[in-house]
Amino acid sequence: MAKQRDAGVSGDLLRLRGLGLTYANGTRALDNVDLAVGEGEFLSLLGPSGCGKSTILRLVAGLLAPTTGGVERVRPITRGDTGFVFQEPTLMPWARIIDNVRLPLDLAGVPRAEAQERAEDGLARVGLGDFLRAFPAELSGGMKMRAALARALVTAPRLLLLDEPFAALDEITRLKLNDDLLALWERERFTAIFVTHSVFESVYLSGRIAIMGPRPGRVVEQVTVELPWPRDLSVRTGTAYGALCRDVSDRLHRAMGALI
Amino acid sequence: MRRLLPPLVGLLFLLTWELVVRLRDVPVFVLPPPSAVATALWNDAPLLLQSSWITLIITVQAFLLALITGVGLAVLFKQSRALEAALYPYAVILQVTPIVAIAPLVVIWVGYERVNLALLILAWIVAFFPVLSNSTAGLSAVDPNLRDLFRLYGASRWQVLWRLALPSALPYILAGARISGGLALIGAVVAEFVAGSGTATGLAWRVIEAGNRLNMPRLFAALTLLSVLGILIFAVLTGIQRRLLRHWHPGGAG
Ligand SMILES: Nc1ncnc2c1ncn2[C@@H]1O[C@H](COP(=O)(O)OP(=O)(O)OP(=O)(O)O)[C@@H](O)[C@H]1O
Ligand SMILES: [Mg+2]
């Protein structure tokens, strides 16, 4: 299954064409972004702070309307087809974990019993099967992020957007969650767009990395990550991984140009 | 030990009071000793408790009315900017107008024979604003990412209100309610003072009446009961707040 995926993408899910966005206060966040996203691929957006990575995700999710250009959805994407994971867990503090995870299904009017079952399954898959009835305040940062991941996946989305989801976590938790995210991806075959500041994280996770330049953001370069799947400790400690990280890091520095 | 300090201070205070009054022979109509107040409390208990009950009922009614109208209006404002722009200034005017000044008017309009209704209206006017302003602030204090999430999943206006905006506003609403509970009591008392015609029979009237008759022990007894009511309302509302918000923060503290 993973073999198929890195052997080649079965087709594009999305195409960003000449995408530009100027915020109401005049900030030009994006200018002429061109990027194709293959169905089932794991794509990372790597770039310096403020280059418009979050803005791209919000445009793709339809939470923002582009100023110029557009997001072409090659395959129809409907409600529930897109999952979103923010940098913060963004759970409702008044609701139990299970109710938080069930939210997307509840909003869509999925019958209660079915929604409950799917939410319980989803929580079991991220290793939170014993914490259904806990409240967010009772969980650690990593566990809250897992719950957010379970919520984003509970609708079985085709497209998962992740905006620096693990940036606020400690190193050990982050590495573990990277592996868990990859395992979920290999199983559920969604398309992932993963925003990160971290060269190491982007190389480890992705099939492809889009490197962005500083504001107004553009995609400056795209790198295909030639590392075998499934990714694991042997990949992380291999020489190819180190070389790729150096390469991507160099390209990132070049993309940032005069800023460095 | 810490919890024992306030009652200890109180006891010491009462003791000093009693001693000073006795040793210096202060006349009862100037300052009655605590023992006289306690006796008055005991002897006039039926009368005072009945009055307490009347004041409490008006206060609770005014508070609940303030809660419903305050939150309800805030929700309406949230749905329509135009409505908020049109009505909010009047809410502020209602708030800044001294209750003492409009009380006689309200009593006349409502009619002396329905003075309790007048008291209810006046107490509501005093109690309503903190709920309105806090709820308005709370309904706007939604986590923007959660709001986006609801949009992403195509939530209806109704779903956003019930599942997101109102729960997010809960801490604000409860904080407003706590202020409003105390104000409802103050409003009920002040209104009765002003309306005070003898047809009102709440605690405030007992204070006036006792004052007119120079029955200081009973006056102090009525005051004591007013404080007790205030403390009771505050304690109950704090308890509700703790309970409803106990899951929001680590450790479960409100
Ligand atoms: N709502 C907004 N209104 C005005 N300007 C905004 C808004 N949101 C973002 N910006 C600006 O647009 C630019 C791109 O923002 P964006 O959040 O997309 O960057 P980012 O790459 O995600 O940065 P980071 O890595 O720090 O999260 C920034 O300069 C930011 O200040
Ligand atoms: Mg960002």
Image (tube, coloured by chain):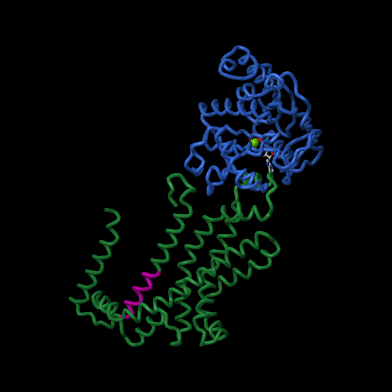
Chain colours: A blue, B green
Residue A158 placement, left or right of B127:
right
Regarding residue A176, the answer to whether it shows in the image is: yes
Query: Was residue A13 drawn as part of the magenta stretch in this picture?
Result: no
Q: Position of residue B177 (x, y in %)?
A: 50, 63
What kind of secondary structure does the magenta stretch mostly adopt?
helix
Regarding residue A258, the answer to whether it shows in the image is: no
User: In this orientation, which residue lies closer to the viewer: B67 or B172?
Assistant: B67
The residue sitting at 46% across, 80% down in the picture is B192
The residue sitting at 47% across, 72% down in the picture is B59
The picture quadrant where one finds residue B110 is bottom right
Residue A102 placement, left or right of B127:
right
User: In this orientation, which residue lies closer to the viewer: B103 or B47?
Assistant: B47
User: In this orientation, which residue lies closer to the viewer: A108 or A59?
Assistant: A108
The residue sitting at 61% across, 26% down in the picture is A182
The picture quadrant where one finds residue A183 is top right
Above or below: residue B26 compared with residue A80: below
Q: Position of residue B195 (x, y in %)?
A: 48, 83
Query: Was residue B225 drawn as part of the magenta stretch in this picture?
Result: yes
Q: Position of residue B253 (x, y in %)?
A: 43, 50
The picture quadrant where one finds residue A9 is top right
User: In this orientation, which residue lies closer to the viewer: B3 or A206?
Assistant: A206
**Which residues, given as a range, are shown in magenta?**
B218-229
Q: Quadrant of ligand 2?
A: top right
